[in-house]
Amino acid sequence: MALSKIERRIKIKHRIRKKVFGTLERPRMTVYRSNRYISVQIIDDTRGQTLVSASSRIKEISEANGTKSQKAAMVGKLIAQRALEAGITKVVFDRNGYLYHGKVKSLADGAREGGLIL
């Protein structure tokens, strides 16, 4: 029996999370993508605490003109700015089971442009 799209993503997510772990020195940057929005968190897995977060649901980004990929790049720059303010320069990227293209890739590229080291 074939897996549904969500079940397939969750299997990939578990496979990734076996290897990717965020520490205080290099926290994990995880992405959640819906059909309409994209959000990202920087998490310290040793304490189980979210350090910084950003989303395309904030007013400046949601009202901006552009495609969803362009808005994802804006979210990437925003998370990089907030992370640098919090003293975070290096992160481990967790694509959360999504394919690394489109909105997820745009977000990662935007974070790199903003100054984060992935």
Image: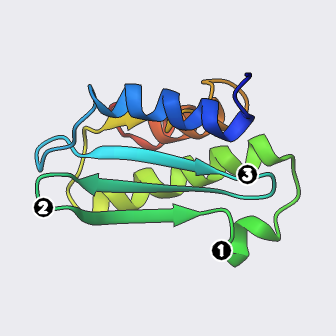
Type of amino acid under label 2: Arg
Q: Which mark is residue 47?
A: 2
First in sequence, mark 3 or 2: give its number: 2
- Which percent across, then down, holds residue 36? 80, 57
Q: Quadrant of residue 61?
A: bottom right
Q: Nearer the viewer, residue 4 or 105?
A: 4
Type of amino acid under label 3: Lys
Q: Quick check: 3 above or below 76? A: above
Q: Which residue is mark 1?
A: 58
- Find the distance from the CA under tag 1 to the CA under tag 3: 11 Å
Q: Quick check: 91 above or below 44? A: above
- Find the distance from the CA under tag 2 to the CA under tag 1: 27 Å
- Find the distance from the CA under tag 3 to the CA under tag 2: 30 Å
Q: Are marks 2 and 1 in contact (CB under 8 Å)?
A: no
- Which percent across, then down, holds residue 1? 73, 22
First in sequence, mark 1 or 3: give its number: 1
* Quarter the C terminus occupies: top left
First in sequence, mark 2 or 1: give its number: 2
* 43 left or right of 2 in image: left
Type of amino acid under label 1: Ile
Q: Quadrant of residue 18?
A: top left
* 51 left or right of 94 in image: left
Residue at 64% of width from left, 44% of height from top?
Answer: 73
Label 2: state its secondary structure. Answer: loop
- Which percent across, then down, holds residue 33? 65, 49
Residue at 12% of width from left, 50% of height from top?
Answer: 24
Q: Which mark is residue 71?
A: 3
Label 1: state its secondary structure. Answer: loop
